Amino acid sequence: MKKNFKKYSDKELLKLIRSSDKRESDAAFVELYDRYALRLNAYCFTILNDRELAEDVLQETFIRLYQYADPSFEGGSIIGYLIRVARNLCLNIKRTKKDFISLDDYDLSQTYEINYENKELSDLVMISLDLLDEKSKEILTMRIFNDMPYSEISQIFNITEARARYIVFRSKMKIRNILAPYFENVPKTKIK
């Protein structure tokens, strides 16, 4: 009988990856990949602005999970671990990469269907993200796009939770100010 790996917790799947049964190990790894690959790829793309590099970092992150993750993993969540690994890989790439993508060449990669108006708004938001400093951009991306708790963000950046909350708040305000001219004639709605 085939196991339903969707019912397993992340930590249980991590233990199964170390199983001596190759099929069980592979299936557990695929389940973790399926759970987090899209969110992690979106994070990497947001940081790197390069689709191919983001995919490379995504693959390298999961390779490291498969090779090095301890089955007795006790720290935080698996997505938190994956983002820490991906963040370090992205930062290493950014340190060595000196060229930047111009706004003329900017193309937002979407992994889901989106109507034209939402795509245009999404493009504007992604471009405004690029106008934030790197730390603010990363923290906002972790919180908004990956729904990471402030406690994990604060651990990754070695800051207090209050500081992480402030950075997210300040970043949202900057983005609102950047996008304000695009919404001058639009009726006011509550923005979360």
Image (tube, rainbow, N blue to C red):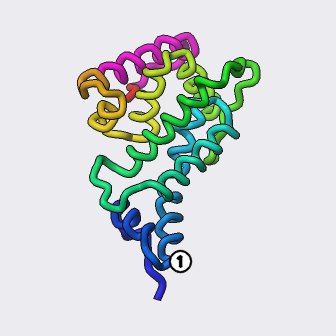
Q: Quadrant of the C terminus?
A: top left
36 with respect to 41 (left or right): left
**How many labels were placed on the picture?**
1
The 10 Å Cα crowd at callout 1, few under 14, some 14 to 19, many 20 or more, is few
Pick whichever, 160 or 180, lies toward us. Answer: 160
Instruction: Report the magenta residues as a range.
Output: 166-189
Pick whichever, 186 or 56, lies toward us. Answer: 56
Asked if the stretch drawn in magenta spans residue 173, the answer is: yes
Q: What secondary structure predominates along the stretch shown in magenta? A: helix
Residue appearing at x 47%, y 60% in the figure: 32
Asked if the stretch drawn in magenta spans residue 72, the answer is: no
Pick whichever, 89 or 166, lies toward us. Answer: 89
Pick whichever, 101 or 184, lies toward us. Answer: 101
The answer to whether any part of residue 171 appears in the image is yes
Place of residue 103 in the rendered image (x, y in percent of width and height, measured from the top left): 70, 18
Residue with the mark numbered 1: 23
Place of residue 84 in the rendered image (x, y in percent of width and height, measured from the top left): 43, 39
Q: Quadrant of residue 164?
A: top left
Residue appearing at x 55%, y 15% in the figure: 131
